[in-house]
Image (cartoon, grey):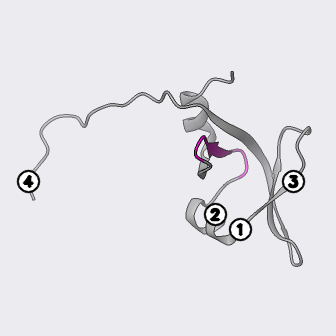
Amino acid sequence: MSETTGEMPKYKCHKEVHALKIKEILFDEMEGYSILPEDARFAAFEIDMDYLEKHNPQEGGYYVVYEDGYKSFSPAEAFEGGYTKI
């Protein structure tokens, strides 16, 4: 394997996404897992095990939905450093 020479290319985000800051991740034996948003205008909503296992969401981070419907998670520092509310 050859060594890299120099810094990797940089990229700037320009996407618009929908996102909610996660206040709490809830578990109920009957309902499964759900996310309780920090914004009280939004109710808790279910998340499936695939999302949970793939993204390992954490309280204080962001539940993110891209324009194509892809759902992701972003730690607060990364999200707040790259996105501005519009």
Q: Which mark is residue 44?
A: 3
The answer to which image quadrant residue 42 occupies is top right
Mark closer to the observer (3, 4): 3
Q: Residues within 10 Å of mark 4 (few under 14, many from 20)?
A: few
Q: Secondary structure at mark 3?
A: loop
Q: Secondary structure at mark 4?
A: loop
Q: Is residue 66 above or below residue 29?
A: above
The answer to which image quadrant residue 79 occupies is top right
Q: Is residue 24 magenta?
A: no
Amino acid type for the residue under numbered disc 4: Ser
Could you tell whether 25 is left or right of 69 in the image? Answer: right
Residue 7 pos. (x, y %): 22, 34
Are the residues at dot 4 and dot 1 in contact (C-beta closer than 8 Å)?
no
Q: CA distance from mark 3 to mark 1?
A: 13 Å
Q: If you read the primary sequence from the N terminus, does the residue marked by circle 4 or circle 2 appear first?
A: 4
Residue 46 pos. (x, y %): 80, 61
Are the residues at dot 2 and dot 1 in contact (C-beta closer than 8 Å)?
yes
Residue located beneath label 1 in the image: 48
Q: Secondary structure at mark 1?
A: loop
Residue located beneath label 2 in the image: 51
Segment tinted magenta in the rendering? 59-68
Q: Secondary structure at mark 2?
A: helix
Between 15 and 40, the one nearer to me in the picture? 15
Could you tell whether 54 is left or right of 11 in the image? Answer: right
Q: CA distance from mark 3 to mark 2?
A: 15 Å
